[in-house]
Amino acid sequence: MKILNPCEIAERSSEMDAEYILNSATFRKRWGLDNFLEACCARRVRKAGLWGDDIKKVGIAKASSLLADYEIHAFGYNRAGPFLASDASNRRELLAIAKKEIDNAVSVGADHILVFPGGLESDSKDLESARLQTVDAIGILLEHAQKVGMNLALEPLHPMLCGDRTCITTLRHANDICAQFAGKNIGVVIDTYHVWWDETIAREIVRSAIENHILSFHVNDWLVPTTHLLTDRGMMGDGIIDLRGIWQCVKSTGYNGPVEVEIFSERWWNEDPNRVFDIALERCREIFS
Ligand code: ZN
């Protein structure tokens, strides 16, 4: 595949088998935290991508004890943000909430916290200001994250989500922001759904690995036609993303973290979650082994 060509860093290539983990968002309509962690444990999947809202439903203390009981390590924690606001006091308030989320991520022992600045305010058309404010806010959050020992993860989302989720829509932009905070606890999450279309992706994956950290690799698939911007992601192998090619590119940089399945899908949310879990693991073994 063309995408592999710039990524041939053979000496850094890992021969280890990939570790496959699930993000709880894949089951959000059918399972709470307890069911999800139990399902991970039953399959000896020892890490999990978690969401703050699921954790808050049971409380931090209970979530921590469930993680300990099932011997699951919290991997990604979603999320810090939104925090963009033109009004200074609103902004302070949102940043305080984001810092609290960073603390929550520390409390459950997460590896990293996803950072999403949020979209433009309803009366704004000023994307450039949103970008500047995002970098300022990340600087503030990073100071706090450094103090409490948490990694901030920038995950570029597909440009179609720029209006309401994040102004960081390319891996290049995420890498550029990381470069401004070089040497600190900040890195990127590469989600195939959001970056597969980008002609610079191979180069930027290499850059992520060299200049900062690839903190996680999220997988799913792009269906054609896509019927919903947020909730019509495909199961790996059902769409048009060159998942194996992108994975080989990521792996060739020396990334030795897990492959994390994250599928927002009305279709899969309505299936038996145990079946979805098993299909996801099976597809991972077929594609990423
Ligand atoms: Zn993701």
Image (cartoon, grey):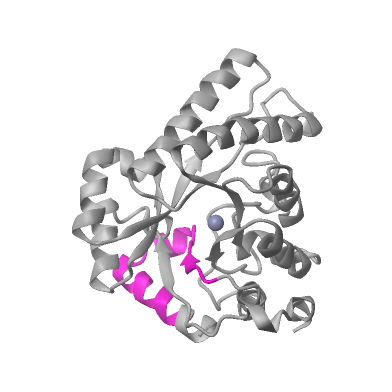
Q: In which quarter of the image is residue 129?
A: top right
Question: Which quadrant does ligand 1 occupy?
Answer: bottom right
Residue 279 coordinates in the image, percent (x, y): 40, 77
For residue 56, side relative to residue 226 (left or right) = left
* Label total for image: 0
Residue 278 lies, with reference to residue 143, above or below; the image says below
Name the residue: 24% across, 58% down: 35
- Most foreground residue, 267 or 259: 259
Residue 126 lies, with reference to residue 93, above or below; the image says below
Name the residue: 34% across, 45% down: 54
For residue 90, side relative to residue 70 (left or right) = right
Q: In which quarter of the image is residue 141?
A: top right
- Most foreground residue, 229 or 203: 203
For residue 119, side relative to residue 42 (left or right) = right
Q: In which quarter of the image is the N terminus?
A: bottom right
Residue 256 coordinates in the image, percent (x, y): 52, 71
Specify the segment rendered in magenta.
256-283
Residue 210 on the magenta span: no
Residue 264 coordinates in the image, percent (x, y): 49, 57
Residue 63 coordinates in the image, percent (x, y): 26, 46
Q: Note whether residue 154 is visible.
A: no
Residue 75 lies, with reference to residue 222, above or below; the image says above
Name the residue: 61% across, 69% down: 223
Q: Quadrant of residue 218?
A: bottom right
Q: Note whether residue 183 is visible.
A: yes
Residue 264 on the magenta span: yes
Name the residue: 35% across, 53% down: 29
